[in-house]
Amino acid sequence: MRSVAGRAEAVALAATYHPDVIIAEAQVPGLDGLALVRELSRLASPPATILVCPRSDRVLDELGVVCLTKPIDLGLLYRHLARLAPRESQVA
């Protein structure tokens, strides 16, 4: 697991390490969730993305991005991670 402070670093690390899933805040300075999703989609093997959003967003749903609202339901997050992770991976 790794954490980053901005969109450019997130995309660079995703291109290098090929994570299965990225979890990101949708609206923080330097990290626009929709822009992150678009940049990640250009990778050869784009990771699944879960964004923490202030509200539900149909655009993100149409892009296949999971959008969780605050406060985060940890059970729901776990179910999404279990569904998105490859079979050989385990979510703990």
Image (cartoon, helix red, strand yellow):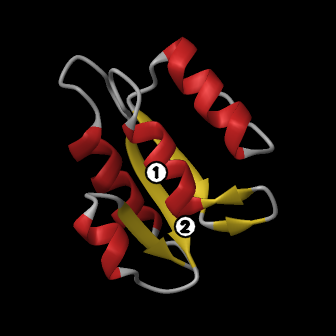
| Residue 68 at x, y percent in the picture | 45, 71
Q: Specify whether residue 45 is in view.
A: yes
**Circle nearer the viewer, 2 or 1:** 1
Q: Nearer the viewer, residue 26 or 91?
A: 26
Question: Going 67% across and 28% down the picture, which residue do you hit?
Answer: 2
Q: Position of residue 74 (x, y in %)?
A: 46, 64
The span from disc 2 to disc 1 (Cα, nearest Å) is 13 Å
Q: Pointer 1: residues within 10 angstroms few (<14), some, or many (20+)?
A: many
Density class for disc 2 (Cα within 10 Å; few <14, some 14-19, many ≥20) is many
Q: Is residue 92 visible?
A: no
62 w.r.t. 82: above or below? below
Q: Tell me if residue 63 comes above or below residue 61 in the rendering.
A: above
Where on the picture, by quarter, is residue 70?
bottom right
User: Could you say where residue 59 lies in the image, as x and y percent from the top left?
Assistant: 34, 74
Residue at image point 55% right, 50% down? 36
Give the number of the disc on residue 52: 2
Image quarter where the N terminus lies is top right
Image point (80%, 43%), residue name: 5
Considering only order in the chain, which callout, 1 or 2, is on the residue closer to the N terminus? 1
- Farthest bottom residue in view: 55
Identify the residue at image location x=59%, y=32%.
11
| Residue 70 image label | none
Residue type marked 2: Val
Q: Which numbered circle lies on residue 37?
A: 1
Locate residue 85 relative to residue 7 in the image: left or right: left
- Nearest the viewer among 18 and 32 is 32
The quadrant holding residue 48 is top left
Kind of residue sitting beneath label 1? Val
